[in-house]
Amino acid sequence: MVYRRTHQVVKRLAARRSAILAAARETCAEGGMAAVQIAPVAVRANVAAGTVYRYFPSKADLISELIADVSRDELAAIRRAADAAPGPSSALAAAVTTVAVHVVSHRKLSWGILAEPVEVDVTESRLASRREIAGEVESRIAAAIRAGHLPAQDTALAAAALLGALHEALVGPMAPDNLEDQAKLRDAVQTVTLLALRAVGVMDARARGLVVQAVLPTKMAAGA
Amino acid sequence: MVYRRTHQVVKRLAARRSAILAAARETCAEGGMAAVQIAPVAVRANVAAGTVYRYFPSKADLISELIADVSRDELAAIRRAADAAPGPSSALAAAVTTVAVHVVSHRKLSWGILAEPVEVDVTESRLASRREIAGEVESRIAAAIRAGHLPAQDTALAAAALLGALHEALVGPMAPDNLEDQAKLRDAVQTVTLLALRAVGVMDARARGLVVQAVLPTKMAAGA
DNA sequence: AACGAGTCTGAACTAGTGTTCAGTTCTTAT
DNA sequence: ATAAGAACTGAACACTAGTTCAGACTCGTT
């Protein structure tokens, strides 16, 4: 064997891979999933179309990884927020608020990841992504129930419904389109968060100070 | 002029049109939106592919009409159920239950109408469909608020969130897949309905007898 | 420097469907 | 019966975007 991958090459390859994924992510954030096509993504990543196929077997795989990637970031953010909360109820509230803030902050990306029509089949990774997020929310609901703060209920169904409410109200086609205004955006986040919490049995989240001031990040770089 | 459309011909043309739409609907109910392709639909309607284009300018138009059609039926069912209820709160509950029952009864069709990826652009008609249904729910929420049964709130956002919760929990990819069992199906409908009502501020729908026994139709012919 | 192996390029290929249209069949009025 | 207008057929066409691959280029070893 006269050729072995040197460390430098390995790094370069990894960088390319990341560049392609990042290009896909940016493309999705700008134009939704419909815009995530091999040729434009390749251009954006400064590679040829064929090169994409040296890193991802197919477009479906590329998008699946994109979904997993965004999902991972989202999950981490939720955990971070929830773990920082003082108790189970506020942890749940923090989790929900985090999701709400994230989806309104990156609506096109969220819509693309969650539900926007794609030509290729990405149901599996979308399902996995939802399961991850829903699982986290579900365990927070369960914790609040154990703590006696919420009535007993089907936690899986509750988590799914809760996320569905957030998504439909904030990113789906029904979402209000005037969310440019920071104040209105914040209102919407708070309203929907309250609604979602009420759905699982939180009696008056506002009074109990559970819904923390939803601080919308002004500079939101790579996070989902 | 030696040819004029006779009444009989007009009727036959209308029947063909309906047959094509019906074929599209059945195809969607069986295999989802992905299965709604011109050739199979034409076969099912006993016409040639080209004939479809004498009735619908394009596939997008066909699907748009399909969506509008299903939506119309759905809306009618909701109105019927809600209008039959004794008061604003139970009208809302009836509306929500109706939606829940319908979507679980025709999951593939619902999923296709609501959110399943399609090659052509049908965002407009999907949006219109959602607005119709959401509008109806919204007015029921508003009525309940006026009657003092619910706290004041953003009714548009509430309606969107409520429907999102139903859809995600009952028809989306996260929906439990063991809904074959009638009893479980009924449970799921009730649970999610309660959850949705709680979200808008109904305190204990069960205690107040709002959630009527969700009777699942055994023979559900054409209704959405 | 030279050679083998790996990597990249991008034009050409492919596949799947929506759409068209020239020819055929049906319908109406004389 | 016949002619003219309308409707129908279905094979051929067109379009779009994912995928391939032969050749060019780069990297690592001797």
Image (cartoon, coloured by chain):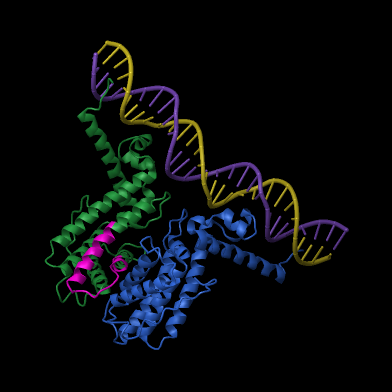
Chain colours: A green, B blue, C yellow, D purple
Q: What residue appears at the point 13 percent right and 61 percent down from the top-left corner?
A: A84
B87 sits left or right of A162 in the view:
right
Indicate whether A72 appears above or below A142: above
Magenta stretch mostly in which secondary structure?
Answer: helix
Q: Dividing the picture into quarters, in which one does residue B161 lie?
A: bottom left
The reply to whether the magenta stretch includes residue A49 is no
Where residue A128 appears, as percent x and y from the top left, is 32, 54
Quarter that holds the N terminus of chain B: bottom right
Q: Can residue A103 be seen in this view?
A: no
Indicate whether A82 appears above or below B200: above
The reply to whether the magenta stretch includes residue A152 is yes
Q: What residue appears at the point 57 percent right and 65 percent down from the top-left corner?
A: B22
Indicate whether D26 appears above or below A186: above
Where residue B206 appears, as percent x and y from the top left, is 32, 82
Where residue B81 appears, as percent x and y from the top left, is 44, 81
Please give the range of residues in magenta: A132-159
A80 sits left or right of B213 in the view:
left
